[in-house]
Amino acid sequence: MDFGDIMKVETTGASQKTSKWDNLGYSGVKASHTMAQTDADRMEKYRSKINKVGGSCGIDPALIAAIISRESRAGNALTNGWGDKRNGWGLMQVDVNPKGGGHTAQGAWDSEEHLTQATGILVNFIKRICNKFPGWTPEQQLKGGIAAYNMGDKNVLTVENVDGGSTGGDYSNDVVARAQWYKTNKGF
């Protein structure tokens, strides 16, 4: 299934709140690119798994890398595979909180099995957004699906404010900008 072209998705990049996590004195696409670049060396050890999972799930590997960068800083922000006060598991931070996503963690935190599970969750959210907003372009639906990966599809309400309520108020915008950086600069 074609989920749109990540390179054609409009993005404003990281918010000031998100860029402050890296002590950046600026926000926007430049901040997202800086954070993606910070994680780039660590990301390389997952390249073959990312490419394999992206191919099998029909998701651009650059998008998987971008979510890994945003969610776990390519594993650097995890403690024994856990993040978000033990509510998130693995590189892509599968939500295991019963009051949140309620998923059961699959595989080791950095395994192909984990990436397949998390990417499957992403695909499911993209499909939900496609059904919820059939009039949106494929790129808008893709962006909405990315936002839903963070905050659930019921919270995606408009294309103009797709990130309203997402972590940092910028989740999909930041992830898209990081994905564009990984695709352009690292060939994911």
Image (tube, grey):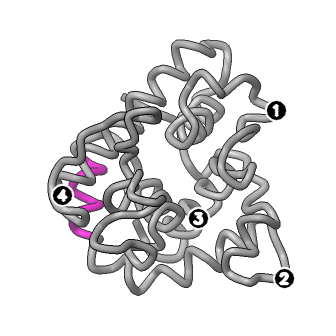
Q: Which residue is mark 1?
A: 160
Q: Amino acid at mark 4?
A: Glu
Q: Is residue 162 magenta?
A: no
Q: Earlier in the sequence, mark 2 or mark 4?
A: 2
Q: Which residue is mark 4?
A: 112
Q: Residue at x 29, y 67 (%)?
A: 81
The residue tagged with tag 3: helix, strand or loop? helix
Note whether 142 is above or below 173 in the view shown: above
Q: Residue at x 22, y 43 (%)?
A: 56
Marks 4 and 3 sit apart, C-alpha to C-alpha, by 21 Å
Marks 3 and 1 sit apart, C-alpha to C-alpha, by 20 Å
Q: Residue at x 39, y 72 (%)?
A: 78
* Of marks 4 and 3, the one in the foreground: 4
Q: Earlier in the sequence, mark 4 or mark 3?
A: 4
Query: Magenta region: which residues?
Result: 47-55
Circle 3 Cα neighbour tier, 10 Å, few/some/many (<14 / 14–19 / ≥20): many
Which quadrant, please, contains the C terminus? bottom left
